[in-house]
Amino acid sequence: MQQLLNELNFKIVETLNLVDVAPDDIDPDDHLIGGKLGLDSIDVLELVMMIEKDYAVKINSKELGAKVFSSITSLAKYIYENSSEIS
Amino acid sequence: MKVYISGMGVISPAGRGIQSLKNWIRQSGRRIRPLNLFTVSPENLLPVGEVSESFEVLEIPRCHQLAITATQEAMAGSQAPPDAVIIGVTTGGILTTEMHLKNRVSDPKAFANHAVGSVAEYVAGKYHCKGPVITVSNACSSGTVAIKIALEMLRSGQVRRVLAGGVDSLCRLTYYGFKSLQLIDPTGARPFDQDRRGMSVGEAAAMMLLVADEATQDNAVIEILGGGLSCDAYHPTSPHPDGEGALNAMRAAIRDAGISPSDIDYINLHGTGTPDNDLAEAKALTSLFGNNLPPLSSVKGAFGHSLGAAGAVEAVISAISISEGIIPANTGCQTPDRKLGLDPVMAPIAKKVRMVLSNSFGFGGNNAALVMGISREKKPPVSRPKKTPFTIEGSAGITGVGDIKKTMENISAGKDCQGMSPLSEISKFLQPSVTRRLKRLPRMALALALAACKNANLQETPSSVFLGTGWGPLSETYDFLKKLYESDEQFTSPTDFIGSVHNAPAGQVAISLGANGPNITTTGGDYSFEQSLLTASILSEKMDAAFLVIGADEFHETLSPLFDRSVNRDGIRSDGGGAICLKRSDVSSGPKICSLFFENTADNPYIIQTLIGKLGDSREIEKRFGIIMAGIPAAFRQEGERQLHEFLSISDFHQPVIDYRRLTGEFASASAVATALAAEFIRNGKIPASLCDGDNHPLNGKGILIVGFGKFVTAIEITP
């Protein structure tokens, strides 16, 4: 799980081109949207695509997205529970 | 001056021809079906508003075919060609381009009709239009914006007949793009329904021949009474949560028509079916109309959202509603969302309709509204002064060597400024939090806008933004399609889709500046900046506030050599642009700029004589201008040089001529750089010696004429 969290931090920075953010500085329990990172709905959609591609986990509704993307911890938890590729 | 609809034509999921729409209005019913036009995997299959005709001629893209079909009907009763063509388009020939890129076609000829601007040029060519051709690429409000520009052009008295409308065909870019934004309702759009989940993408074309007349015509004739434009300046895709921009556009349209909200008998809603759009529109409507809302409906649950065409199709539907006395149903909605406080028309209503308000809103926070109605006796509005010059308050440029200062230094030292500035150089004054989602073109646009404002040193920030781009955001378009194809059409980038829209850069500028006035992107190859300046001139005559006119294009390794025939694969790769911050001259002083001439070379053998006639005679030209800056795109080198030679010999002009593409390199908006340079020359009162055979060339109070040659001939005057 910790490995997944670290991996997600890195992928979020890379996918969203957060040039002034170091992956290690992201607090996994911070609000992902509207928090320190300054992410919005477009970023969520970009992450949805990345997660589907890299973990084969679909997040295809706004309601689900709002829940899953509340923090990196919640995102990691959702991926962990729904991915067949992570054991 | 009044503006009437003299002819209309349409092709939509309801069928071909006005009669098909009339039939649909009476019968209602959904015309949304699973996609058939191109193959997608079963899990990607979504309902769309598709036109049933297949159009077999492969060289001519579907979008062009749709446009010409609607035009044929609109022009059927008319012998004389239109004086101008103004069409809203968002993706042009991309459906064909997508196929060629997938098959790795490398012959630029295959992409000859790729450009978004090529649709209007195709229509203008077929209908022998000698005048200006403008393509508005303002996402989903394009069609409505095109009609508003036509209205103002006709009101100004410069032209008598304008062919205006909108068109878009289905394509992978928008199909997968909107899907990636999770904005598609898998069961088909249900505007204003309590369970609505999104839109359906559609395709269509609708054209109107609009004519200007001083006199009030027969009662049956429908008049375009007014139009209003605004920008949310809030977010690239989401509408302002309270519908502030939508409200401003509707208010402006009603004011422009000289009526009050209570005069409106029917509102044709934008109503895409997405939760946020419908909510914002509902809020704006209740703010404006309170409890006195007239009957209202969106047709997007029937036809889907045909993007650039939608506003034009809905203007045609509004006109039919008036002429036939029938209000169309808000198809697709089962249970209206009570939270919205609207009561959409559930089945067609027979009712006398005198005046209609039609809304269109789009990405980039672009809002447009039109008021149409049965012509009635009223005092015509006070005629406006023609051709107001504008003062250049500030200017900026980007070339291969850097900003305008570095460009001037290079030119003064006898060097050119071809090449591409590094992305880091372009972005050096931009915030990383802003640029992280922006690729090359929007960064250029933003950097140019900020530099022009800084140079202007005004107390106010510009309220309107006009941007011309020959090819739009190429990096985003390419990256989107690349990711799509590499993943076997499974994955895309929503960020790239949003960025690929031609008006995304202008939208970014508006957000950065808080510019909530009209925000218009025009496109038409090498004449895109000229289109933008012309559009700005037409729309800004009534505005006291400052506005920006920007021209920018990026070089893209793969796409530029395929799309732009002036770009030589082996030549120096160049890009850049220019921006000017303008104010009306009667409220400001300084160097002045005026868009003087814009004509189509096709079917126009006396175009150079016409230009000279517009400028006066040879004595007048010699007296007014100290130098000519000539723009000759490499693709039209031979023809352009012939035109320049003809101009010089007829006008007997003996002052220096700067062939400016030799300095800037080849890219569509090189003329925007030329304009920024000309502003510098005028401020300095002289032309650098390096450009005039070794001697500084004083202007002695004379102006500079920037002439574009090739497919179109254009002229911009800059005077002290």
Image (cartoon, grey):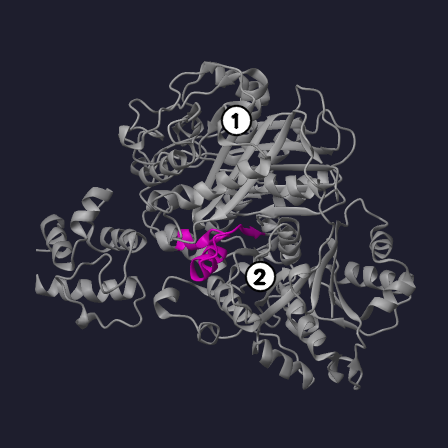
Q: How many marks?
A: 2
Quick check: can you spot residue B309? Answer: no
The label on residue B299 is none
Between the residue at mark 1 and the residue at mark 2, the CA separation in whole angstroms equals 38 Å
Query: Which segment did they paint magenta?
Result: B496-522
Q: Are marks 1 and 2 on the same chain?
A: yes
| Residue B677 % position (x, y) | 66, 73
**Callout 2 secondary element:** strand
- What's the residue at 59%, 69% (across, down)? B394
Earlier-in-chain disc, 1 versus 2: 1
Residue type indicated by callout 1: Asp
- What's the residue at 55%, 30% (across, down)? B315
| Residue B344 % position (x, y) | 38, 24
| Residue B400 % position (x, y) | 57, 75
> In the shown orientation, is residue B307 left or right of residue B414?
left
Residue type indicated by callout 2: Ile
* Residue B368 position (above or below residue A25): above
| Residue pointed to by mark 1 | B263
| Residue pointed to by mark 2 | B550
Quadrant including the C terminus of chain B: bottom right
Label 1 resides on the chain identified as B
Magenta-colored stretch includes residue A81: no
Quadrant including the N terminus of chain B: top right
